């Protein structure tokens, strides 16, 4: 039985469920093909988009793609839906919603006002009707500003997440990479380390190291060690210097169980981190990472396409007022996003959907070494996202993460993007760069300030190193 159908070029195309329709309307990607839910042909994909364009947005409030009774994320999305915010767009079809978003008369303030009434499924649906330039044009309208010790997301600004990973969590190695990034103007989003182990003592040592660096040089930024949320809760109780609470999240309850968490645990961690009151210009304390394909890799996708499930992860994120949300877009591998073209499309979709839902979106422009992608693909995605107004990107030494073994963007890449698009660091961080003599008029200088000279690296290690 087909609930949704259309005759196209003499062929009747039908789809039994809303989830099947959304999957068929998605641009080609290897993950949906692996799950057996992708469109059979380009003709079927076009047919699905025709049908989707004529569906009322309100259908996503009456028909859950993952059953309400089985999934706490569905319940979160439906129970927290804001009917007042939804009212200005409630009469639109998905296609009409697209036209409203693209209209010159619709500005970022209007979109932001509607955001609490837009469900993740609505955002995913409209993105499937958009060209890349549409995704860029709408996302560029939207500013989502967040604050902790720096202010992220202001117009004309681009922040950098400095990621000084080390394969053995060696304090000297982490400090050296941190210094490298600071010298090139990175770190205003966060200085965040992926630990090689989730051991609480190691995580605490890294937190103290990063906090020692921050305090020694009076750097207006925030630090984070990307341990599991349960480890962070333990460290908050131990009095460790926790600025932001990190967690990877996904778009279904079952996938999040695979990450060892649920919404109640996230709420507990949010409250615990807030209680520390370590921010200076704001108190947004959550840092989430996501990525298309996580539900499929956990065998917890419920027959739903990976991009729609990614948008549902943003539904989780916005319930906790995050400081940063980072789509690690190509990290899982070519089984989910096969090549540079698929990674680029996913990056633009993720950024658009997150911003549409009111989130402070950054993107880790990355690929694994067995993907059909290279540095030229990264350059293209980086530039497109810069034009789209991405809040932050990654800064990894040499663009090669030696702990996680994937390719990302470098400190130099961030300098390139700031230069060609006239973007500047977060205002508090920019003022610090100028105060220590490392930057002038928004540009990194060639003279090394004595305060950050390499012969002082031993001091960076601090008493906890």
Image (cartoon, rainbow, N blue to C red):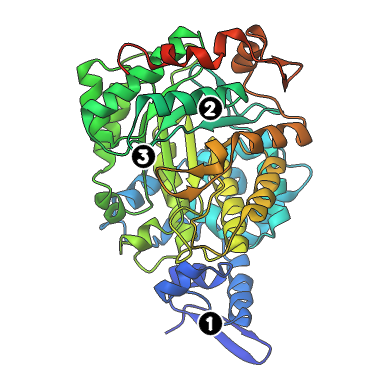
Residue at 36%, 25% (x, y): give it. Answer: 171
258 vs 359: above or below: below
Q: Where's residue 130, x and y in %?
A: 67, 59
Tell me which numbered mark, 2 or 3, is placed earlier along the sequence. 3
Tell me which numbered mark, 1 or 3, is placed earlier along the sequence. 1
Number of marks present in the image shown: 3
245 vs 330: above or below: above
Q: CA distance from mark 2 to mark 3?
A: 23 Å
Q: Which mark is residue 167?
A: 3
Location of residue 266 by image quarter = top left
Residue at 36%, 58% (x, y): give it. Answer: 295
2 and 3 marks in contact (CB < 8 Å): no
Mark 1, residue position: 40
Residue at 49%, 46% (x, y): give it. Answer: 327
Q: CA distance from mark 2 to mark 1?
A: 42 Å
Secondary structure category for the residue under label 1: loop
Q: CA distance from mark 1 to mark 3?
A: 43 Å
Secondary structure category for the residue under label 3: loop
Secondary structure category for the residue under label 2: loop
Residue at 47%, 50% (x, y): give it. Answer: 406
Q: Nearer the viewer, mark 1 or mark 3?
A: 3
């Amino acid at each position: 039985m087909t609930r949704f159908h259309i005759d196209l070029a003499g062929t009747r195309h039908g789809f039994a469920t809303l989830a099947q329709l959304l999957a068929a309307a998605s641009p080609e990607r290897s993950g949906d093909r692996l799950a057996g839910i992708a469109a059979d042909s380009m003709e079927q994909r076009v047919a699905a988009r025709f049908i989707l364009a004529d569906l009322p947005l309100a259908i996503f409030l009456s028909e859950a793609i993952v059953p309400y009774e089985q999934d706490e994320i569905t319940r979160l999305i439906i129970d927290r839906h804001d009917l007042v915010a939804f009212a200005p767009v409630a009469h639109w079809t998905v296609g009409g919603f697209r036209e409203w978003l693209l209209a010159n008369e619709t500005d970022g303030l209007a979109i932001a006002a509607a955001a609490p009434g837009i469900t993740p499924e609505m955002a995913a649906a409209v993105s499937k009707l958009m060209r890349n330039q549409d995704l860029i044009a709408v996302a560029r309208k939207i500013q989502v500003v967040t604050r902790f010790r720096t202010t992220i997301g202001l117009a004309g600004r681009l922040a950098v997440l400095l990621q000084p990973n080390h394969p053995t969590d060696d304090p000297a190695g982490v400090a050296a990479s941190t210094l490298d990034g600071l010298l090139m103007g990175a770190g205003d989003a966060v200085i965040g380390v992926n630990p090689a182990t989730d051991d609480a003592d190691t995580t605490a040592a890294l937190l103290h190291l990063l906090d020692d660096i921050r305090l020694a040089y009076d750097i207006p930024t925030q630090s984070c060690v990307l341990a599991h949320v349960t480890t962070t809760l333990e460290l908050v109780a131990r009095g460790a210097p926790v600025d932001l609470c990190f967690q990877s999240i996904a778009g279904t309850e079952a996938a999040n169980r695979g990450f060892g968490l649920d919404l109640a645990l996230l709420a507990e961690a949010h409250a615990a981190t807030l209680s520390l009151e370590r921010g200076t210009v704001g108190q947004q304390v959550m840092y989430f990472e996501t990525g298309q394909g996580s539900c499929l890799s956990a065998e917890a996708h419920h027959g739903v396409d990976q991009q729609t499930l990614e948008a549902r992860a943003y539904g989780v994120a916005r319930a906790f007022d995050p400081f940063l949300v980072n789509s690690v877009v190509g990290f899982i591998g070519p089984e989910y996003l096969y090549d540079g073209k698929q990674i680029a499309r996913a990056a633009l979709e993720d950024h658009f959907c997150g911003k549409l839902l009111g989130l402070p979106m950054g993107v880790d422009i990355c690929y694994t070494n067995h993907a059909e992608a290279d540095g030229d693909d990264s350059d293209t995605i980086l530039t497109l996202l810069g034009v789209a107004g991405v809040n932050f990107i990654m800064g990894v030494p040499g663009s090669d993460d030696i702990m996680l073994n994937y390719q990302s963007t470098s400190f130099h890449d961030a300098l390139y993007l700031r230069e060609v698009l006239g973007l500047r660091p977060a205002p508090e961080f920019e003022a610090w760069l100028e105060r220590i003599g490392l930057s002038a008029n928004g540009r990194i200088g060639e003279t090394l300030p004595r305060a950050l000279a390499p012969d002082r690296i031993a001091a960076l290690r601090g008493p906890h190193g």
